Image (cartoon, rainbow, N blue to C red):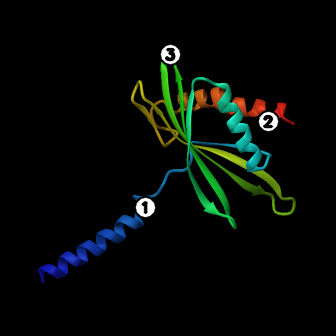
């Protein structure tokens, strides 16, 4: 009798775990759209990263397949005199519009961490994430926008 109640408790606990989505992932902190193919976005990203001596980065993962498209992950570190921020970003191609298909590439900010102040996280409401998002945009996203317009 004791074994049956333990099995029922384990099964119920497992169902509760999935029903409450404890293991669910968070949506991106912020998304940035570019009206270019992902191959052009990758070039713009690499060019922007070359310009800054305060960047450290690594292309960490590729997920997806040929049919549904690929997504690429980058670990990015932006370092300055009073900052040492780590970011995880994902970029991928997407289509917008039903009739008029427009190629859209997106950069998604997945996480932002400040190693000096030990703050940050994966949600926009986490401590200092808004501040780190602003830094990310001014030091990285703006460079991609500049590269995109100068390479046209």
Residue 22 image-quadrant placement: bottom left
Which mark, by number, is residue 148? Answer: 2
Q: Residue 79: percent from the left, percent from the top?
A: 52, 24
Quarter the C terminus occupies = top right
Q: Mark 2, mark 1: which one is toward the viewer? A: 2
- The total number of labels drawn is 3
Q: Residue 57: percent from the left, percent from the top?
A: 56, 36
Q: Is residue 140 above or below residue 102?
A: above
Q: Secondary structure at mark 2?
A: helix
> Do tag 2 and tag 1 residues touch (Cβ < 8 Å)?
no
Which is nearer the eye, 8 or 152?
152
Q: Secondary structure at mark 1?
A: loop
Q: Residue 105: percent from the left, percent from the top?
A: 73, 48
Tell me which residue sits at (29%, 75%) in the image: 11
- CA gap between label 3 and label 2 equals 29 Å
Tag 2 or tag 3, which sits nearer the N-term?
Answer: 3
Residue occupied by mark 3? 81
- CA gap between label 1 and label 3 equals 40 Å
- CA gap between label 2 and label 1 equals 39 Å
Tell me which residue sits at (24%, 78%) in the image: 8
Tell me which residue sits at (79%, 46%) in the image: 36
């Amino acid at each position: 009798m004791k074994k049956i109640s333990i099995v029922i408790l384990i099964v119920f606990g497992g169902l509760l775990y999935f029903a409450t989505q404890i293991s669910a992932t968070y949506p991106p902190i912020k998304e940035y759209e570019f009206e270019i193919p992902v191959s052009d976005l990758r070039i713009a990203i690499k060019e922007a990263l070359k310009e800054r001596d305060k960047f450290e980065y690594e292309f960490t993962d590729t997920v997806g397949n040929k049919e549904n498209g690929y997504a690429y992950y980058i670990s990015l570190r932006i370092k300055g005199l009073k900052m040492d921020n780590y970011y995880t970003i994902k970029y991928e191609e997407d289509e917008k519009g039903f009739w008029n298909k427009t190629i859209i590439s997106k950069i998604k900010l997945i996480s932002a961490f400040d190693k000096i102040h030990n703050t940050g996280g994966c949600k926009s409401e986490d401590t200092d994430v808004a501040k780190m998002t602003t830094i990310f945009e001014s030091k990285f996203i703006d460079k991609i926008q500049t590269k995109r317009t100068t390479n046209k």
